[in-house]
Image (spheres, grey):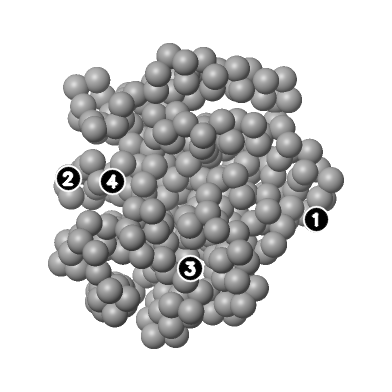
């Protein structure tokens, strides 16, 4: 399908079997769970998807499985950034070849690089494909912030840059992207607790790891904002916010996997060096999910 991004995009976790291998059946189940919950798209191999703990071949396989499972029902965004342009080009071309609708490119995340080196990297990788590109800004992991001035330059100089996922957690910066650069690039908020604020300000959508756990609830918040029913949007957000806030106050990947396990969906543990959630963390998350279940948000039609 052609890229028609909007709304809630699930930042899919990476399910692992008990022997540590990629759980392809579990990955397909995750896709079905998100689509059934009404999300508008899927993101593979992002930070929530533990891409840095996977081999390149595993990352490629994740994209293949998700594209096949989605079967054109929602767009698939494949995160294909790497520590070198050569590796990123390989992953990016593969994603395009197997049917990803958009590629999301994180800047190199180990060796410190300059702004000009960042620009050259993004230009080189983006030029290797014709599909739309989503910039991925996550300064705590990369050491460089794609600020609005730099984003404007990238949007002007790279023809297929169409979107940015801003995971800076900086709402002031997000507002500048949304309001000052909206004619050049569409902004997706990558900080789950800013979902309602971002949507009300005009963000194109949200890339949410929490959508693995509460896809229906987040999809319903987006639908209410889209329909301009702000009272309903606030009510729905008030109901789901404690869960999202609770997930983000814990180490995020273990918290997401623990929440899914509490919901009866065992997708394995994070790969080392990340540890599983503690019993105390799991108990806190269980309490929040039980509180949310009292509201039982329906699936959007």
Vertical side of 239 occupied by 114: above or below: below
Q: Position of residue 131 (x, y in %)?
A: 37, 70
Determine whether 96 is above or below 239 in the image: below
Residue sitting at x 54%, y 22%: 285
Q: Are marks 3 and 2 in contact (CB under 8 Å)?
A: no
Q: Secondary structure at mark 2?
A: loop
State the residue position of label 2: 55
Residue 163 is marked as 3
Q: Earlier in the sequence, mark 3 or mark 2?
A: 2
**Which residue is the extreme one toward the bottom?**
157
Indicate the position of residue 136 as horizontal and vertical percent values.
40, 61
Between the residue at mark 1 and the residue at mark 4, the CA separation in whole angstroms equals 36 Å
Q: What is the CA distance from the residue labelled 3 to the residue labelled 2?
A: 26 Å
> N-terminal of the two: label 1 or label 4?
4
Q: Nearer the viewer, residue 127 or 180?
A: 180
Q: Are marks 1 and 2 in contact (CB under 8 Å)?
A: no
Q: Which mark is residue 228?
A: 1
Please tell me which residue lies in front, 272 or 49: 272
Residue beneath disc 4: 51
The reply to whether the C-beta atoms of the residues labelled 3 and 1 are less than 8 Å apart is no
Q: Tell me which residue sits at (41%, 57%) in the image.
A: 138
Distance (Cα) linking label 1 and label 2: 44 Å
Give the position of the N terminus as an image quadrant: bottom left
From the viewer's perspective, is the residue at label 1 or at label 4 nearer?
A: 4
């Amino acid at each position: 399908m052609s890229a028609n991004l909007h709304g809630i995009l699930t930042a899919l976790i990476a399910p692992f079997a008990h022997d540590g291998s990629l759980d392809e059946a579990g990955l397909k189940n995750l896709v079905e769970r998100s689509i059934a919950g009404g999300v508008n798209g899927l993101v593979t191999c992002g930070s929530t998807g533990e891409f840095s703990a996977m081999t390149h071949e595993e990352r490629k396989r994740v994209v293949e499985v998700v594209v096949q499972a989605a079967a054109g029902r929602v767009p698939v965004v494949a995160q294909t950034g790497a520590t070198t342009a050569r590796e990123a080009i390989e992953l990016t071309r593969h994603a395009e070849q197997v049917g990803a609708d958009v590629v999301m490119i994180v800047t190199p995340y180990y060796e410190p690089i300059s702004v000009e080196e960042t620009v050259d990297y993004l230009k080189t990788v983006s030029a290797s494909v014709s599909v739309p590109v989503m910039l991925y800004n996550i300064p705590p992991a990369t050491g460089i912030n794609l600020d609005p001035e730099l984003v404007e330059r990238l949007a002007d100089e790279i023809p297929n840059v169409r979107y940015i996922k801003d995971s800076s957690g900086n709402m002031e910066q997000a507002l500048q992207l949304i309001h000052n650069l909206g004619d050049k690039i569409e902004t997706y908020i990558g900080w789950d607790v800013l979902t309602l604020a971002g949507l009300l300000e005009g963000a194109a959508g949200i890339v949410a790891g929490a959508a693995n756990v509460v896809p229906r609830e987040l999809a319903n918040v987006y639908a209410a904002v889209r329909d301009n029913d702000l009272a309903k949007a606030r009510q729905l957000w008030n109901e789901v916010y404690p869960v999202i806030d609770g997930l983000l106050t814990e180490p995020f990947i273990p918290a997401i996997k623990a929440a899914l396990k509490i919901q009866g969906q065992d997708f394995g543990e994070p790969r080392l060096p990340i540890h599983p959630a503690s019993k105390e963390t799991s108990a806190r998350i269980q309490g929040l999910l039980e509180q949310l279940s009292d509201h039982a948000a329906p699936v959007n039609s």
